[in-house]
Amino acid sequence: MSTYSETVRELRSPGRIAQAPRSALAPARGIRLAVGVVLPLTLGVCLGHYEYGVYAALGALPSGFAAMVGEERKKPAAVALASAGMALGTFVGALAANAPIPLVLFIAAFAYAAGLVGAFSDRVAIAALQWPGALLIATSTPDTPRQAAVRAGLVLAGGLFQSALVALALPKPTDTASATRPRRSLREFNGHLVAIVRTHAGISTHHGQHALRLALTAAIAQSAALLLGLAHPYWAALTAVLVLKTEHVLTVRRALDRIGGTAIGILLGLPLAALAHFGPAALLIGAGVTIALGYTVFPASYFLYSVFLTGFVVVLLDLLGFGAGQTALPRLLATLLGGVIALVASHVRPS
């Protein structure tokens, strides 16, 4: 067990919460990634199928974060990896939403897989973390197998669209060496990935221990939210998955940022959702600006990112028929629960 001294030091520095170094901001990339989210959403709204636009946007939204880390030429592949796993997670989550016990087992399995695969690289870790996230979000609206397949296809399409935009934005090689640099084949990548998984399966390594802890924490958070009867229990497990890190101090920082950012983001989401009274165009513009800001501040401040992301998600849920006012308090309570469970789990460190 770790001591609580690290936690106390974090709580003594509230002024750090909203800091966002200007050098870490990425406005151009934020706008570019926001386009990949808002265009599918706009298409769905214009066609009168709001739910289709939302599902495609939910595929493009998390996939964009996989384009934030690593070498430029490898980012499209990371986005595609996130999209494929999210599509599978969406299908499973929509089918298992009304079966609590299998759902908890699926959540644990997806979280464990994300933890193991994350040992490959930081870029792959971010991509894999979107898999259990998509599964959890899909549980908000249970579906038949056919409908779940359609949703999964829309999520995959949204993610691949984001991947294509990322690829188009890649800078062209400026020298012969970079242009002729050998690329790792898919077979080599798969072989390396399998070797990583074999190495870290079990609890003999640090990554293996974290993967198991991530799976158990996600399962406990979902189970606790269900037992407490929270209206949107998946937010508890989602928060736990996104907050829990290999390092305790980083988990504390993420938990505080996530909980505080969610609270303020809900307040931001209420007037954003109210823009619908002025027509779809006003709502889409407000949503686009919000998610662009979220992508922009993501490398600089997890707190501010949580604020803008929450505001944007409130708009998406409102488009699906979950009123902004009705989902605000349940989501905040579930986020608080998931954050607390992640904080407790961060203190458990098997040697």
Image: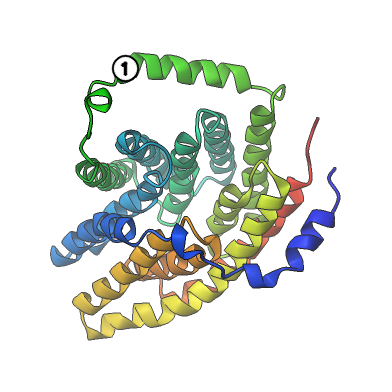
Viewer-nearest residue: 87 or 272: 272
Q: Is residue 217 left or right of residue 187?
A: right
The structure residue drawn at horizontal position 57% and vertical position 16%, both measured from the top left corner, is: 198
Does 166 appear above or below 259?
A: above
Q: Is residue 325 visible?
A: no
Does 175 appear above or below 18?
A: above
Quadrant in which the N terminus appears: top right
- Residue 313 falls in which quadrant of the image? bottom left
Outermost residue toward the bottom? Answer: 278
Callout 1 crowding tier (Cα within 10 Å): few <14, some 14–19, many ≥20: few
Quadrant in which the C terminus appears: top right
Q: Secondary structure at mark 1?
A: loop
The structure residue drawn at horizontal position 40% and vertical position 18%, both measured from the top left corner, is: 190
Q: Position of residue 251 (x, y in %)?
A: 67, 51
- Residue 112 falls in which quadrant of the image? top right
Under mark 1, the amino acid is: Ser
Q: Is residue 130 visible?
A: yes
The residue at which mark 1 appears reads as: 185
The structure residue drawn at horizontal position 20% and vertical position 59%, both measured from the top left corner, is: 39
User: What is the tally of numbered marks visible in this picture?
Assistant: 1
- Residue 340 falls in which quadrant of the image? bottom right
Viewer-nearest residue: 323 or 191: 191
Outermost residue toward the front? Answer: 175
Does 332 appear above or below 193?
A: below
Does 70 appear above or below 241?
A: above
Q: Is residue 161 left or right of residue 191?
A: left
Viewer-nearest residue: 74 or 236: 74
The structure residue drawn at horizontal position 52% and vertical position 62%, both measured from the top left corner, is: 301
Q: Position of residue 5 (x, y in %)?
A: 84, 56
Q: Position of residue 255 (x, y in %)?
A: 64, 59
Q: Position of residue 308 (x, y in %)?
A: 44, 68
